[in-house]
Image (cartoon, rainbow, N blue to C red):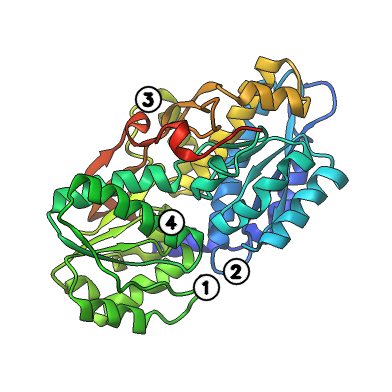
Amino acid sequence: MRTARVASRLAPLAVAGIALAAAFGSTTQAQEGDPIKLGAIYITSGAASVYGQYAQQGLRLAIEEINESGGVLGRPLTYEIEDSQGKADTAIQAARKLVFQNEVDALVGLDSSGVATALVPIMPELQRPLIITHAATPAATGELCNRYTFRVSANVNQNMKAAAHIAADTGAKRWTTIGPDYAFGHESWEFFGKYLKELDPDVELMSKTAFPRFGNEDFTPYINNVMALKPDGVLISVWGGDLVNFVRQANNLGFFEQDMEILMTVGAATEVLAALGDDMPEGVWLGTRYWFDAHDNPINEKFVKAYMERHDAPPSYNAEGAYAAVYAYKAAMEKAESTDPEEVAKALSGLSFEAPNGTITFREGDHQATVGPTWGKTAAMDEATGVRSLDPMRSFDGKEVTPSVEETGCKMK
């Protein structure tokens, strides 16, 4: 099957990523000067490693394109990657190694909100700009914000405001949730409830919820408990390999045959859809920070075409986020006419650049990109891509779903 071929190609990436990264720059065209080093921190082992693998694909594609076009300020780009393992202490050690030992010029990455809340506060110590491409906790560009930290992807706040609009339109009144028992799961439910209540004050946010630990293998009791509640709607923020396991177990228990609306906050990650194939049921609302078929612009067309030629699969939001971050650094370094970390951080603040999902701007006040997510309902399998299509599909304007800087709690320092 197509998905099996994709999975077999992805498996070696976690092992080979560092070696491949080190090779970049040796085959570039005639740039002069030392390479510009990017340090990447992603999950490259364990159940969520596919996210890091897709991110590496986006990084490599952007670096390849830029180096073939002459590099940045006449210098080639390279990257080195460290495995965060989804653990805060490991990620902090990785960041310090990349900065103090490997002497990278800038950082990119982070998959886990828990990792982000631990690493972001030490960025002033590291004195390197960091562009977050995946971790979605609002705190990273909210109360923990600092002049070195930026996020190119949609955060929980933005995604849940969009989700609330989808939920309100369904007419479902009684809602509960199943999500991982850490910041991402709890914040998803908190902000979803906040925005849904604003749209429909009559909805009930049920007190009985389910928060299995991240990395949980048996979701059966949580699924059964939620079905016993007989809600009208369920917000599911389980992600990665956990979501793959959840969907398969939920299918066996008849979860998707119940009379309730299902919203999966990041269910349209193509890593998940490729792994599940037609095990992902039809008629379920899925959210994603980027959907490859939702943006009609030349940069997205180029990105999707190049990515699919290399990987025989559509790019995920993880690949797109990493790809966009590299181009953001290129734009900032060229604006600053320097790779000095302080100058690059200054140039990133307020920067606008073109990405596959449109024009991206890092707000000066909190460094959050004003981007909107895409939500869609699962439809037929697309044989050309190996994943379910989304129909209907709705992409949200970042300006409409992004709270003001004052609301975020950011006090830039």
Residue occupied by mark 3? 297
| Residue at 61% in and 32% down | 412
Of discs 1 and 4, which sits in the foreground?
A: 4
Marks 3 and 2, the one that precedes in the sequence? 2
Task: Say which label, 4 or 3, has the lower sequence index.
Answer: 4
Q: Residues within 10 Å of mark 1 (few under 14, many from 20)?
A: some
Amino acid at circle 2: Gly
Q: Earlier in the sequence, mark 1 or mark 2?
A: 2
Which residue is denoted by mark 4 in the rendering? 187
Kindly indicate whether the residue at mark 4 contacts the one at mark 1 (C-beta within 8 angstroms). no
Q: Helix, strand, or loop for circle 4?
A: helix
Q: Secondary structure at mark 3?
A: loop
Q: How far apart are the alpha carbons under marks 1 and 2?
A: 9 Å
Q: CA distance from mark 3 to mark 2?
A: 35 Å
The C terminus sits in image quarter: top right
Residue 156 to residue 410: above or below: below
